[in-house]
Image: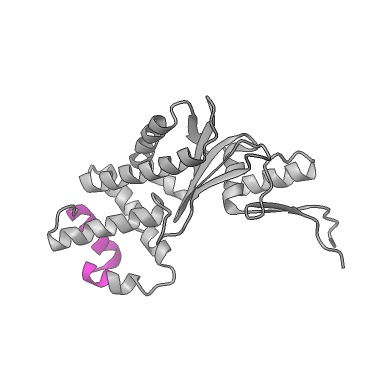
Amino acid sequence: AALGVRRLALAGDAVTAYAGALGQRPGAVVAAGTGMIALGTDLTPAGGWRRADGWGHLLGDCGGGAWIGRAGLEAALRAYDGRPGGSAALLASAEAVFGPVTGVPGFLYPRADRPAVLASFAPEVGRRAAGEDAVALGILRAAAEHIADAAAAVCPPGEGTAVAWTGGLFGIGEPLLGPLRRALAERLPGARPAAAAKSPLEGALTIAAALAGDRLRLPPDPKLLQITRPARG
């Protein structure tokens, strides 16, 4: 109010990611880093926003960085034990990053930043997948399937609907993006998948500029996008 602000947009990070990726077009956006969430809208008040996943590393975030890192560490421990489904390559990576794998549970479980620690191993899974490790490739294929499932759950119907991905997880590159494009083509054959046009920070600026110019078309939502007036003293 002291700065003369007449209206304020309070936007969740999934909404700023959406606005950065697609602007104010209808479609679906998957944002993946440590976690994973999908958000979609047809821009109508009746349709509002549709959300899938984003439930945290214990109950969801399937296909996100923590999910991939946890699967990679599980494969490392399976190799250490001699159980099926293990990867000697991921075992070597885990020990290079964390030290002897027998100490990983005691190191990991008590930490408040456990999701971030798990996600820190996702690039190693990507590196081993790029080296053609079969287990690592399988983990990224499964992650891509989960991400595509979330996108399909929120994508508005219609031929040519835009579907975008954004977030640091996709820095893994083609070992993840290749399976993701194939999975999206299977689930949303009429959609137009693409990388995000802009960053979530630029999405926040897009929302602010649209609000200032009375051009905001993204639907309001009490948990995702609130438009309010600052209280005056």
User: Quick one: 202 or 145, which is closer to the camera?
Assistant: 145
Q: Which residue is located at x 40 percent, y 30 percent? A: 185
Q: Which quadrant holds residue 91?
A: bottom left
User: Quick one: 128 or 6, which is closer to the camera?
Assistant: 6
Q: Which quadrant holds residue 21?
A: top right
User: Residue 15: image x %, image y %?
Assistant: 60, 48
Q: Is residue 87 left or right of residue 114?
A: left
Q: Relative to 164, does residue 92 appear above or below in the rendering? A: below
Q: Which residue is located at x 45 percent, y 59 percent? A: 56
- Where the C terminus falls, by quadrant? bottom right
Residue 99 within the segment the image draws in magenta: yes
Magenta part, dominant SS? helix
User: Residue 149: image x %, image y %?
Assistant: 41, 41
Q: Relative to 161, does residue 17 appear above or below in the rendering? A: below
User: Residue 74: image x %, image y %?
Assistant: 25, 59
Q: Which residue is located at x 66 percent, y 39 percent? A: 46
Whether residue 93 can be seen here: no
Q: Residue furthest left?
A: 82
Q: Is residue 32 left or right of residue 233?
A: left
Instruction: Find the magenta span and give its range.
Output: 88-104
- Where the N terminus falls, by quadrant? bottom right
